[in-house]
Image (cartoon, helix red, strand yellow):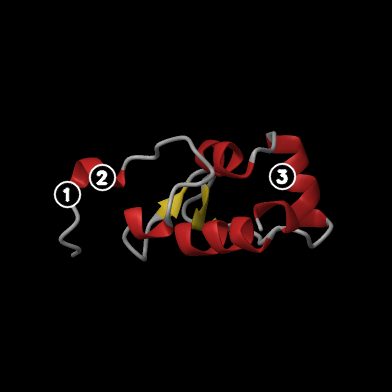
Amino acid sequence: MSNIPANDWALRRYPTDDVRTYPPDTLLRLDQVCEIVGMKKSTLYKAIADGDFPPPKKIGKRAVGWSANVVFQWVAERPSAR
């Protein structure tokens, strides 16, 4: 386990949050991803269908999540983030 205090793992609701705030294996849920990337759910799923956003990992029967590393890497690679 990481030596980062648990309260520092909380999502701060800003797209500029650094992935180092999260342990490498953190899975973000849909609402968190939508806030980080600035998209609504329908827009996010359209981007996934179009191949413009990484697909989620299935973590349960009706639950999906995204790796924090993948989401923050996608945000960093966006042209508007440069």
Report which residue position mark 2 lands on.
Answer: 8
Which amino acid lies under the numbered mark 1 shown in the image of this protein? Pro
Badge 3 density bin: few <14, some 14–19, many ≥20, Cα 10 Å: many
Q: Is residue 32 left or right of residue 74?
A: left
Q: Earlier in the sequence, mark 1 or mark 3?
A: 1
Which amino acid lies under the numbered mark 3 shown in the image of this protein? Leu
Give the Cα distance between marks 1 and 2. 6 Å
Badge 2 density bin: few <14, some 14–19, many ≥20, Cα 10 Å: few
User: At 17% from the left edge and 49% from the top edge, which residue is drawn?
Assistant: 5
Q: Please say if the residues under marks 1 and 2 sit with CB atoms less than 8 Å apart.
A: yes
Give the Cα distance between marks 2 and 3. 26 Å
Badge 1 density bin: few <14, some 14–19, many ≥20, Cα 10 Å: few
Q: Earlier in the sequence, mark 2 or mark 3?
A: 2
Q: Nearer the viewer, residue 16 or 42?
A: 16
Q: Is residue 7 left or right of residue 56?
A: left
Asked if 82 appears above or below 6 in the picture, the reply is below
- Residue 51, position as x, y percentages in the image: 79, 62
Which amino acid lies under the numbered mark 2 shown in the image of this protein? Asp
Find the residue positioned furthest to the front.
82
Give the Cα distance between marks 1 and 3. 30 Å
Where disc 2 sits, the SS reads helix
Report which residue position mark 3 lands on.
Answer: 44
In this rendering, the label closer to the viewer, 2 or 3: 2
Q: Which mark is residue 5?
A: 1
Q: Please say if the residues under marks 2 and 3 sit with CB atoms less than 8 Å apart.
A: no
Where disc 1 sits, the SS reads loop
**Quadrant where the image shows the C terminus:** bottom right
Where disc 3 sits, the SS reads helix
Q: Nearer the viewer, residue 18 or 64?
A: 18
Q: Nearer the viewer, residue 34 or 63?
A: 34
- Residue 78, position as x, y percentages in the image: 70, 58
